[in-house]
Every structure is written in C-alpha cells, then in structure tokens.
Image (tube, rainbow, N blue to C red):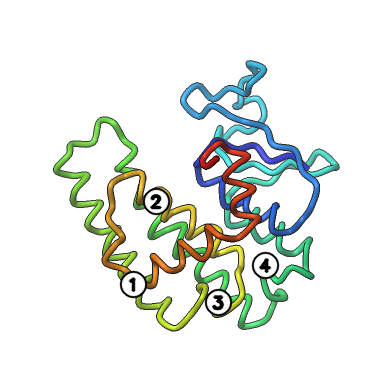
Amino acid sequence: MKLYYSPGACSLASHIALCEAGVKFELVKTALQTHTLADGTDFYQVTAKGQVPLLELDDGERLSEGPVILQYIADHAPGTGLAPAAGTMARYRVMEWLNFVTSELHKGFSPLFNGKMPQEAKEIFAARLKDKFAYVDRQLEGKDYLTGTRFCVADAYLFTMTQWAEGRGIDLSGFPNVEAFIARTKARPAVRDAMKAEGLIK
C-alpha cells in the first residue's frame, strides 16, 4: 500500500492508523501548496481531488476521504481493535465520531487556513471550534478514548485535529479531558512513529 500524505495534514490520522495496524506501507509525500510529489509529478494526475489522504492499494485501486480510509485500514487489521465489527452498535458509535470529527472539527478549521479570511471572521470560527472541543471534553469524561478504554480510528482523527488546534492558536488548556487524551495518545508508540516519520517530532 501507498499513503499519499502531507506532513501534519489530516492524512496524519491515516498514517497513525497504518502504524497501529502494523501493516507494510510506503509513504508518498505531497506538497499541497503546489500539488506536486517529490519527483515533480502533478498530484492531480494521481487524484482529481488533489487532496490527501489518498490510499493506493496493492492492486492499484485508490481510496480517498479520510474517514473511509480509516475504516478500510481497521477492517483489514481486525485483530487490532481499531474499529468494531461492521453492523454492530459499537461500530456505528465509531462512525458517529468519525462523522462528527470530519464535519464539525475538520471542516471547521477551513476558514482558519484561508489567508484571505479577515481576522475578525477567523476569531468567530475559532470560537465555534472551541465550543465543539468543549463538547468533546464532556464526552471524554471518565474515558481514555472516545468510545471507552480502547483506541480506535476516530481517536487518530481527533488527535490530528487537536494538533491543528495547537498550531492555530486555539487554547485547549481549559479542557482537562481533552488534554489527558492528547497526552495519552501522543505517548502511543505508533503515534510517535507516524509523527517522527512526518518530521513533526524528533
């Protein structure tokens, strides 16, 4: 498998999941500003969306959209517990969280990455995001991870969004459960391996 990624982008969640799954994969770095690969290849020639993550399977087929890729990885590494069995209520809970993170957090960051967005508007969107993180903090009360004691693919996605929050000046220090989640997740060997490979930590 190949994972097309950009350091620190939302593809970090898929990278973490692959490391957690213990499968063999190749990393293909993508420059999102220029939409080119390291060898100069136009990324739009690889995927019409021009976005990461993109997972290329061994048969050459490609999957896009982070939440889908995360579930694919989990389903092909069932012994890891990265996602419960399809059709179970536990699986739907994971899917519920994946949808929340992608729609309420991930997309909520888009205005903050827009250089043309006025600062006053960015502050409004940042405040909305903080409200969403407050909700997450309440849901993490008494839990190690989003669905309980076991790390799942939704946790990899949430963790990536917490790193974006730090990079965009959204203070999460008032959310003790989120802070504990970040520390707990960052200490996982697979998470550290992914972050090191992307040059995000030493």
Q: Mark 3, mark 1: which one is toward the viewer?
A: 1
Q: Mark 1 is on which residue type?
A: Tyr
Q: Do the residues labelled 3 and 2 touch (CB within 8 Å)?
A: no
Q: Earlier in the sequence, mark 3 or mark 2?
A: 3
Pointer 2: what residue? 107
Q: Which residue is drawn at 54% across and 64% down?
A: 155
Task: Please name the residue shown 69% across and 78% down the image.
Answer: 87
Q: Indicate which disc residue 82 carries.
A: 4
Image-based side of 23 in relation to 96, left or right: right
Between the residue at mark 3 and the residue at mark 2, the CA separation in whole angstroms equals 20 Å
Check residue 93 in the rendering and tell me which mark sits there, or answer none. 3
Residue 196: % across, % down: 59, 42
SS for callout 2: helix
Label 2, label 4: how many angstroms apart (C-alpha)? 23 Å
Gap between marks 1 and 2 measured at Cα: 16 Å
Foreground: 193 or 133? Answer: 193
Q: Which mark is nearer the camera, 1 or 2?
A: 1
Q: Which mark is residue 85?
A: none
Q: Which of marks 2 and 4 is nearer the N terminus?
A: 4
Residue drawn at x 54%, y 26% as measured from the top left: 31
Residue 86, horizontal then vertical, whole percent: 71, 74
Q: Calculate the distance from the C-alpha at mark 4 to the C-alpha at mark 1.
A: 23 Å
Give yes or no for contact between labels 3 and 1 (Cβ–Cβ under 8 Å). Answer: no
What amino acid type is highlighted by mark number 3?
Arg
